[in-house]
Image (cartoon, helix red, strand yellow):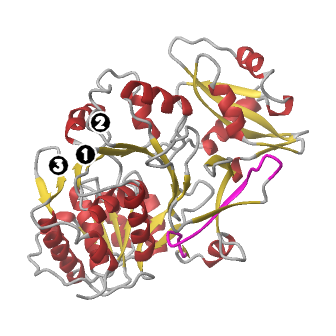
Amino acid sequence: MTLNPIHAALLSAQPDAAVFLTSPDGAQISYGALRTLVAQRAAALVSAGVTPGDRVLCQIEKSPEGLILYLATVWAGGVFVPLNTAYTAAELEYFLSDATPALLILDDGATAARSVAEKANVTVATPGVLAKGGHDPLMPVSRGYDDLAAILYTSGTTGRSKGAMLTHGNLISNAQALQTCWHFTAQDVLIHALPIFHTHGLFVATNVTLVSGAQMLFLPAFDLTAIANLLPRATTIMGVPTFYSRMVGDARFDKAAFAGMRLVISGSAPLLAETHKAFAQQTGHAILERYGMTETNMITSNPYDGARKAGTVGHPLPGVALRIAKPDEAGIGGIEVKGPNVTPGYWQNPEKTKESFTADGWFITGDLGQLDDEGYVSIVGREKDLVISGGFNIYPKEVEVEIDAIEGVVESAVFGLPHPDLGEQVAAAIVLKKGASLTQADVLEALAPRLARFKIPRSIQFLSELPRNTMGKVQKAELRKTGAALASSN
């Protein structure tokens, strides 16, 4: 058999008859059927002009076919590039020009995107056309651990999206480390309710399932009722904090409902300590929080056995090294990592690649963190979100923890706004519990004995909810825009 790490590690763990995926309508795909479908789709991709190293862009709604196309692309030696379905046709122009794909896969109704692709002379195919090719299964194309398997574009909050390159070795090493740390086996049944254009749903959830030979219960989107109905059949779930905050207070998600569950995992955005505590009280499960990013896959995880500390993301995974660069007096500094999980760089962007690595080869995550006495990592915030007011460094997380502790507050986000004298001033956006009636004066009074004066927000806005991206991360760039507009109008 030719060397293809994705094939060897992800598609050979189970006998043909074992179930890989079950759809909401009850339709199932066995591991044997998956291998056949992947090999046939790979042949269809080659017939459409895909050669080893070519990029295949895919912008389709979540479906089992999306997973098959991911695996088929790397089976054929290509580079899979999933795109958020929320991207407009105008945004697609950039991805086509940057990735220069051999093929763009679109749903049948994506007429605007098809028009953009045609103007760029990019071949377009639909999942249905690729499935009807009638091609003989393709043998896996020989690829090595250092060959590219995927490019995932970052959210681009500070400019144009960057394409993080991920190799076969990046993906396989991470899946195997997570399987070991989270004790995944062929007996596991995962509820999959995440998007598959992002590393969480596409690589963490899918690759860990495959490398362990487990099953997944595949949902097209996050749906509380659907998840409640699936819990008796599942052993584990991976989600973003929003999944669990919405389960808290819902009577369907109690200890009895979670009696057969082995593991509940959260990532992609910080999990509030309050949610961690409330979920544990309600369900009997301590959520296992982990930390990663597009460019590195997963970096750390709270332990399977041992304390899962609320507000921390645990220890580095096996084979992954983490250090805190230039720590201040509180031990807070930039998080840098090294390991087989780390991207070789950004697609066609050598300048940004060079900026993202230290002289001795560590990847600069852009996150601020600290280690406690037991080596647990806590994320304090993003370096770009650090507020420097009057020469003092203010870490948003520290202020957010104190605001969140105020009676009546659901959550908060702290950020910096320009100030003519201080350089920046501390600002906060706060979401209140239903029926709460806190004022800015109430918040400031509660914070006065808890924080130094320079850390206390000078500007507070109350919102019905915080702006978030599809993976639940708070968009502080949006808050800075609205906060600046409010400040200028006052």
- Which residue is the site of mark 1? 219
357 vs 260: above or below: below
Q: Is disc 2 placed on a helix, strand or loop?
A: loop
> Which one is in front, 450 or 57?
450
**Chain part drawn in magenta:** 328-344
Q: Amino acid at mark 3?
A: Ser
Crowdedness near tag 2: few (<14), some (14–19) or many (≥20) residues, C-alpha within 10 Å: few
- Which residue is the site of mark 3? 23
- Which residue is the site of mark 2? 223
Q: CA distance from mark 3 to mark 1?
A: 7 Å
Q: Residue at x 66, y 76 (%)?
A: 361
Q: Residue at x 27, y 63 (%)?
A: 210
**Position in image of residue 380 (x %, y %):** 67, 45
Residue 404 horizontal side relative to residue 179, left or right? right
Q: Residue at x 27, y 33 (%)?
A: 259
Q: Amino acid at mark 1?
A: Leu
Picture quadrant of residue 221: top left
Residue 403 horizontal side relative to residue 94, left or right? right
Which tag, 2 or 3, sits closer to the chain's start? 3
Asked if residue 410 lies in the magenta stretch, the reply is: no
> Which one is in front, 188 or 400?
188
